[in-house]
Amino acid sequence: MSSKELTLNRKDLARALKLTQKSYLSPGYCKKWNIPFSHSCIVFTANPHTGFLGVCTSTRDMAVHISISMSGQEGLTETLMFAVMAQDILPVFRRLEGEDIQFRIHEHRLEVLHSFGSFSVPLVEEGLDYFNAKLSGLQERDTPIHPEMEAASLRSVLNRCAYAMAHDSLRPVLNSISVRTGGDTVDFVASDGHKLVRIQK
């Protein structure tokens, strides 16, 4: 496999990694509870046709997918998926400098180049098929729905719903807020079995 090269804005990538840092598991936890190894990884999906790099993490009950733009790509003609251990890349990435950084993807390792040098981390192959199948399942909808709300409005709605959520670990379904949409409105519903909140935006 010849190396592929992506050019990314460091601040955009840092923001994406910060948003995903709570949605992966440690390798030891995955091994202890027989959870697919991909849940301890950060999975990147580079799409040369759209010009975006997807940054994905997943636990048993949570998945985060963030897209950032690629300012350059070399040797990339089709969608490329690769993964690294989250604990390998996150501590080092916080110390990177410069405006742009480059991902150079080799056969078994990812090389990250920045203003003052570079570092390499091994690529992870175990569990990628599972992650790919899970991601494909989330993308089966032919016509995706993209509701948009102002951040302040969404924060207000979630804060108003939070008090009605259950905090009982025996009822995990009630420990969440149900979000339903269709047409021009979005419904937010939370209940702990006694209190019920429904907000429509």
Image (cartoon, helix red, strand yellow):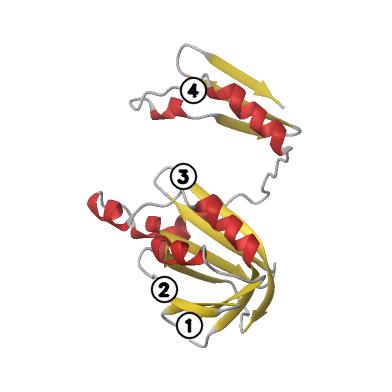
Considering only vertical position in the picture, is 103 above or below 149? below
To which residue does mark 2 refer? 123
* Residue ranking furthest to the top: 194
User: Do tag 2 and tag 1 residues touch (Cβ < 8 Å)?
Assistant: yes
**Disc 3 to disc 1, how far (Cα)?**
30 Å
To which residue does mark 1 refer? 106
Q: Amino acid at mark 1?
A: His
Among the two numbered marks 4 and 3 on one chain, the one whose residue lies closer to the N terminus: 3
Horizontal and vertical percent for residue 146? 70, 45
Query: 140 or 80, which lies in front?
Result: 80
Quadrant in the picture for residue 11: bottom right
To which residue does mark 3 refer? 62
Considering only vertical position in the picture, is 34 above or below 41? above
SS at badge 2: loop
Among the two numbered marks 2 and 1 on one chain, the one whose residue lies closer to the N terminus: 1
Among the two numbered marks 2 and 3 on one chain, the one whose residue lies closer to the N terminus: 3
SS at badge 4: loop
